[in-house]
């Protein structure tokens, strides 16, 4: 007996919505049936960033509904493409779009689940982070339970590194083991890199493949200065977001690079942003992972497609082997949508979805809210 479900994910990179059609046989066996992604237009992406920065209530309310409508259309497109009827689905799991994340205090994801339920006629599980925050946790990261159950190594350790807007890691001692998992956000993933890229060319959402950054010269002294940010000294459990590592932080990086070398190329700021992400990840793994940690590092998320970023990471993390998630499992862009499909399934089974050692919550909690079909 298995359950067919959709996982929906729109991440902090703001690049679009990912929808995964999955068949769940058990907590440790999930098959990806089909994956669909839809990019957001620059105008729509800017509207999300504006709402995040300004927090205007009416804009948030309208955006909440519009996101729900867009995701319903994206889900409908995937169902049509896979010749699947919505009546065949057991549920939809929707992470929502993070608008504000203040660890251990408040977290807000929007994208009205009622719209999804109404348009598709399917039960929706949403709002996964709030319960963990209510239980004293960070509300993030939530991927570790899936990393442990689905993607760990059977005979040794593994680091699962996701390069979304923020970078987060899960240290899995062995597949199926959740009580010794260590997971946290290391800091910026592609959020700063993308913001610097937009400053060079507002028409481009990101530096494709890291081509522009590869033409620049990273300013390591600027990176050293930025790495003094208090977040990097904070012990796990910890999580962060665009409230800390967003456009304002990117503007500071650009200004510091330009002040250091007036007339410097914009590509130098971009190369510096890449170096900051790489060094912050390497520093955090070295600082907080067990000293005897062994295994490999498996990278997913949009940043895995940035050739320069991936190459520098491989060098910085040596002798750990650095591999792409897609080379071991399935399309890495689908990973988080698959994860939230599993979290939805766990919620409906009454099973905990958080890993307290990763979020700092007072204990295991069933996550998510249910909107009936």
Image (tube, rainbow, N blue to C red):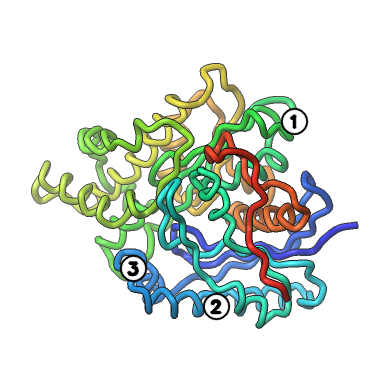
Residue 350 x, y percent position in the rendering: 75, 52
Residue in view at x 25 percent, y 32 percent: 224
Which residue is under mark 2? Answer: 70
Residue 354 x, y percent position in the rendering: 62, 44
Q: Which numbered disc, 3 or 1, marks the residue that appears first in the sequence?
A: 3
Q: Which numbered disc, 2 or 3, marks the residue that appears first in the sequence?
A: 3
Residue 242 x, y percent position in the rendering: 36, 54
The residue furthest bottom is 119
Q: Which mark is residue 154?
A: 1
Cα separation, mark 3 vs mark 1, equals 45 Å
Q: SS class of the residue under badge 3?
A: loop
Q: Which mark is residue 308?
A: none
Q: Where 214 sits versus 148, above or below? A: below
Mark 2 surroundings within 10 Å by alpha-carbon count, few (fewer than 14), some (14 through 19), many (20 or more): some
Residue in view at x 28 percent, y 37 percent: 229
Mark 1 surroundings within 10 Å by alpha-carbon count, few (fewer than 14), some (14 through 19), many (20 or more): few
Q: Where 81 sits versus 327, above or below? A: below
* Nearer to us in this view, 262 or 279: 279
* Nearer to us in this view, 158 or 96: 96
Q: Is 311 situated left or right of 35 in this image?
A: left
Task: Select label 2 or label 3 by which is in front.
Answer: 3
Mark 3 surroundings within 10 Å by alpha-carbon count, few (fewer than 14), some (14 through 19), many (20 or more): some
Quadrant (top left, top right, bottom left, bottom right) of the C terminus:
bottom right
Which residue is under mark 3? Answer: 55
Q: How many numbered dots are placed on residues in this image?
A: 3
Residue in view at x 35 percent, y 70 percent: 51
Q: SS class of the residue under badge 2?
A: helix
């Amino acid at each position: 007996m298995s359950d067919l479900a959709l996982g929906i994910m729109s991440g902090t990179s703001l690049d679009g919505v990912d929808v995964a059609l999955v068949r769940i046989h058990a907590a440790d066996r999930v098959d990806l049936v089909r994956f669909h992604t839809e990019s957001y237009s620059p105008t729509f992406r800017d509207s999300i960033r504006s709402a995040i920065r300004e927090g205007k209530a009416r804009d948030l309310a309208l955006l909440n509904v519009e996101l729900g409508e867009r995701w319903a259309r994206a889900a409908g497109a995937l169902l049509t493409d896979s010749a699947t009827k919505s009546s065949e689905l057991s549920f939809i799991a929707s992470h929502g779009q993070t608008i504000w994340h203040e660890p251990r205090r408040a977290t807000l994801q929007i994208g009205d689940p009622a719209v999804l339920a109404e348009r598709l006629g399917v039960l929706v599980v949403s709002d996964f982070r709030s319960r963990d925050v209510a239980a004293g946790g960070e509300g993030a990261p939530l991927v570790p339970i899936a990393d442990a159950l689905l993607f760990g190594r059977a005979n040794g350790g593994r680091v699962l590194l996701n390069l979304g807007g923020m970078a987060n890691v899960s240290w899995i001692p062995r597949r199926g083991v959740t009580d010794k998992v260590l997971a946290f956000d290391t800091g910026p993933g592609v959020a700063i890199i993308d913001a610097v890229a937009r400053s060079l060319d507002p028409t481009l959402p990101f530096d494709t493949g890291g081509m522009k950054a590869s033409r620049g010269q990273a300013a390591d002294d600027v990176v050293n200065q930025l790495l003094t940010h208090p977040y990097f000294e904070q012990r796990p459990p910890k999580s962060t977001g665009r409230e800390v590592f967003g456009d304002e932080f990117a503007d500071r990086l650009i200004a510091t690079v330009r002040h250091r070398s007036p007339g410097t190329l914009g590509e130098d700021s971009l190369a510096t942003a890449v170096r900051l992400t790489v060094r912050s990840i390497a520093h955090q793994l070295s600082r907080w992972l067990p000293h005897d940690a062994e295994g490999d590092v498996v990278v997913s998320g949009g940043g895995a497609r940035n050739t320069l970023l991936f190459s520098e990471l491989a060098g910085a993390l040596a002798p750990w082997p650095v591999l792409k998630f897609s080379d071991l499992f399935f399309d890495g862009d689908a990973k988080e949508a698959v994860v939230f499909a599993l979290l939805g399934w766990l919620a409906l089974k009454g099973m905990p979805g958080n890993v307290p050692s990763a979020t700092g919550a007072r204990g295991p909690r069933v996550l998510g809210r249910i909107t009936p079909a």
